[in-house]
Image (tube, coloured by chain):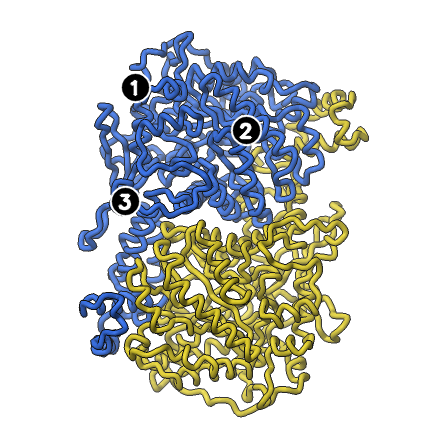
Chain colours: A yellow, B blue
Amino acid sequence: MADINSKLEIGVTTGPIRGSRKIHVESPRFPGVRVAMREIALEPSSGEPPLRVYDTSGAYTDPSVTIDIGAGLPKLRHDWIVGRGDVEQYDGRAIKPEDNGQLGPDRSGGVPPFPNTVKRPLRAVSGRNVTQMHYARQGIVTPEMEYVAIRENLGRKQLKEALIRDGQDWGASIPDTVTAEFVRDEVARGRAIIPSNINHPESEPMAIGRNFLVKINANIGNSAVASDVASEVDKMAWAIRWGADTVMDLSTGRNIHDTREWILRNAPVPIGTVPIYQALEKVGGIAEELTWEIFRDTLIEQAEQGVDYFTIHAGVRLAYIPLSARRVTGIVSRGGSIMAKWCLAHHKESFLYEHFDEITEIMKAYDIAYSLGDGLRPGSIADANDEAQFAELYTLGELTKRAWEQDVQVMIEGPGHVPMHKVKENMDKQLASCGEAPFYTLGPLVTDIAPGYDHITSGIGAAMIGWFGTAMLCYVTPKEHLGLPDRDDVKVGVVTYKLAAHAADLAKGHPAAKLRDDALSRARFEFRWRDQFNLSLDPDTAEQYHDQTLPAEGAKTAHFCSMCGPKFCSMKITQEVREFAAKQNSAPENFLAAEDVEAGMAQMSEKYREAGDLYIPAAE
Amino acid sequence: MADINSKLEIGVTTGPIRGSRKIHVESPRFPGVRVAMREIALEPSSGEPPLRVYDTSGAYTDPSVTIDIGAGLPKLRHDWIVGRGDVEQYDGRAIKPEDNGQLGPDRSGGVPPFPNTVKRPLRAVSGRNVTQMHYARQGIVTPEMEYVAIRENLGRKQLKEALIRDGQDWGASIPDTVTAEFVRDEVARGRAIIPSNINHPESEPMAIGRNFLVKINANIGNSAVASDVASEVDKMAWAIRWGADTVMDLSTGRNIHDTREWILRNAPVPIGTVPIYQALEKVGGIAEELTWEIFRDTLIEQAEQGVDYFTIHAGVRLAYIPLSARRVTGIVSRGGSIMAKWCLAHHKESFLYEHFDEITEIMKAYDIAYSLGDGLRPGSIADANDEAQFAELYTLGELTKRAWEQDVQVMIEGPGHVPMHKVKENMDKQLASCGEAPFYTLGPLVTDIAPGYDHITSGIGAAMIGWFGTAMLCYVTPKEHLGLPDRDDVKVGVVTYKLAAHAADLAKGHPAAKLRDDALSRARFEFRWRDQFNLSLDPDTAEQYHDQTLPAEGAKTAHFCSMCGPKFCSMKITQEVREFAAKQNSAPENFLAAEDVEAGMAQMSEKYREAGDLYIPAAE
């Protein structure tokens, strides 16, 4: 990755994305609400306006901010949170040795604690509810909602002049323009969430919902087998650089608490976790020794740190577990299998299900969103859309309504492994069962036979289910099923999912999505190579691939490409045909009638004969 | 690629694919018809039978054949072709200097001519028609059809015992078992083709049609900018090693004739070309100087060499060209733009359209199949499904029927760049216009914004359109739009398209497709790592990715993987739950009632406490 236009600073990649600059759009309504975007400037001679794109990268791509990961990011939302007058600081839970997992009493091998930890966390004042859903239902537009509206609205104004709503949205309600009021309404009815723990003020507000841009999540996290804190923070920064909208910290093994603190304090995107992973570490990995008390304590621990959404596998009910016994791949969700084991061992209903309303009580005091886990999701094509999976989904629908009774935000996790012809049924059933709460799927993979390429097998399913209405797509890297992703894998996974999410936005007819495709296609057609690179999801790779065949600097301004060579380019021929028509003042309709076509073609023929001199020789 | 289980022999990769062996299935009906397949043996202790998979790799993976690319492959079909008594040898067209393109009179810089060229080619005896379609319509089952039936039928017998037809086939007619008679009928009605030039006896018969397995094509070919003959032959062998069903030689620039001869004599798969590329080279790259005579002579030249299908852009009619003038990316097909330029320059109808029946006359004398080119395909999301594209498609439908009047086999090329919501319309219109002739699409790419990842943007569209009924998918490599693919790109492109084609087969409900997914999923669930690698489309990459995290040999037999570590594996938990149930003789239905569940769980809990000793330490 030698040619990445960035520098390493304390191990984290910073600096603008090639060809882009960070801009901020100010809210006319909320002073201090400045929404970060990325602007791609195009060749001045092209007459093209700069293109604004959605920007998840936070301060890491802002040269005016000095990154110090030991200090953490600026607390963007702090004043908004405190300004509402419904939170209080309190003496939080003391950090316990077991919070960092399997470390021995001497803590040797542990990561250093984050230096700048907030000593006294926030929570809702007794009797108050601090969720965005609660405000929304009270008719209150928060700065977070305003931020989301400006952020999502990106580029739509440009398109407004000739707004063509070309898509099949399968019943979504995507507006021409996103207003803060629209955001409020979507959050109020549960169709969108803004994950925003009051103890994670560093996060830049974003919405997950079917009527907004399709989002993607990247998983990071150390495991018992490998990883360290520096590389996890860097993976987070690296994932958001390329477009991850949220990041889940799935750490297991040692140092869970401290690793999470480093990640949260440096994360401008919502962070999700699966609290049962840490709870299991606290009981030495013995699922049947889990208790409600240990789990509850873990929720508080993570709530105080600022986790924005929790995956809770409360739909794995005792009665559903036998439904999985005849599957080809049984229960593949880690959380699901832990709960299944607990239920069987105790022959009891899941404590997550039993204590669901208490969990909701905790979550509303911090504004943590539910990500209701699909513990019985299929782990193979053979097990897709079976009774176990859908039984759990109906329960998730029931739990959604219970969470909404307390105004707690909810999204629903989905599969997994599903052949193409069964993908839509997942979306339809989820919409019907869960009251249009946002769907958040892992792929799905549309075949099992390509380990090493599961970012692609799952990218196919992700694009499709995103089109059908899934609000967020959880990425899969090339290492899925095989090993732990490294930096390159994280990037490939994120870019694959960005293109899948974008393909979904296009197919849904999102009013601004096509702007970027069209700008890139025009650049391609006009041989503006630099613009083509800069408009792409991964400018570094695009330029690198181009240069492998034609490294000369002149080839980036040449009116041909390596596929066809100088004399044989179809784009060039079309362009010349069109330019000729324009010169002759003949409208396309008159093309065939124009006598001068032939004269013009004779001129062009002359030009072609000189082609060897006009273009860069092939060998260069 | 250091760990590929193969050796380089005269620059071409040979040797079995890891974990597989070549087998041959003999026809009970046609002596000498021995159909090559690949068999993946699974761990004996698993009790799983070996799995047979479709094999496109030819002799290169057969250790019993010595590869000598200067001699070419054995002529598998020679006796079948000659045995029909309807062909004659004749003095072929003499090779002319312009056949090898831009070489100067001293031929310096040219590739060596293929040493073992057949001096006298075959053609149909005057008044005879040697196409597979002609035989099929006469009710004749050829050895080629028998070969195809045995080849396609792969694995279906195994499934027959519990045949579950699970899929949405969108009106296809996929049989439970493929018989030679079924193949004959599909070819007779034009729903499938068996590309099989009588001068390419080295090719192993294969069918392209909606009711057969979805096929993929890989493009190779030198250009004016780069490449040489050795690397092109190796790219062909490399592409078929990983699953390319046909290969198109898209060479431009120098050495076109000689390069093609090397490829054909060494190709066990059908080879396609775009003859207009070579014709253009013969007139120095000046499209308007093309003539019917030069084009016709090029067809004969390539027919005698043994090209199995020709892309002919006969649908780019004069009247359609203005329809492209307001597009964002105009005409992106090279053939299409050449013909557009010719038509405009001469203000005449396309000579390909005008001489279509004469072209068909030539093709039937050698059994070359048409691949009717979509010269007006969209080159961007903005241009998808427009008037120009569909006007041409209707003409391709008209030409299909004209070709069928002479019993010449036809497939239809399709786009290109199409957002997801417009993909199905392409398939529906093609089926309606072209009498169910096989559709052969390039992707389509579902977004334009990811250069460097267009194997994925197009793999999404390819999987979808394959599901809807496309018979063959033309691959796209990561270098698309940027540069020339190298060996690694070819492999990534082929594997991506194999997984897309397989996902399509699964979704269509192809009766044997799921066998491989299920075998791999069982191997995954049972921690048979070697079986999981060997069953995958790319065993080398799967194993390499696994070993990056857990290189120790023991980790390949360990009952955990690197994602979760030894104590935290959901698959293991499920498996233990299931084993426990089996031991207790309790049917899944009785799980919840079984008193001994708790006792069993207590035992397992003990086992977990010893986990650190039972499993390989994480650091290894």
Q: Which residue matches tag 3? A: B159
The front one of A552 and A347 is A347
Marks 2 and 1, how far apart at CA: 30 Å
**Percent of width and height locating residue B361:** 48, 14
Question: Is B229 located above or below residue A506 in the figure?
Answer: above
Q: Is residue A590 left or right of residue B324?
A: right
Q: Secondary structure at mark 3?
A: helix
Q: Is residue B381 left or right of residue A310?
A: right
- Please name the amino acid that badge 2 sits on: Gly
Q: Earlier in the sequence, mark 3 or mark 1?
A: 1
Q: Which chain contains the residue that carries disc 3?
A: B
Q: Which chain contains the residue that carries disc 2?
A: B
Rendered image quadrant of residue B390: top right
The front one of A188 and B260 is A188
Q: Which chain contains the residue that carries disc 1?
A: B
- Please name the amino acid that badge 3 sits on: Leu
Q: Which residue matches tag 1? A: B80
**Percent of width and height locating residue A74:** 63, 77
Q: Which residue matches tag 2? A: B373
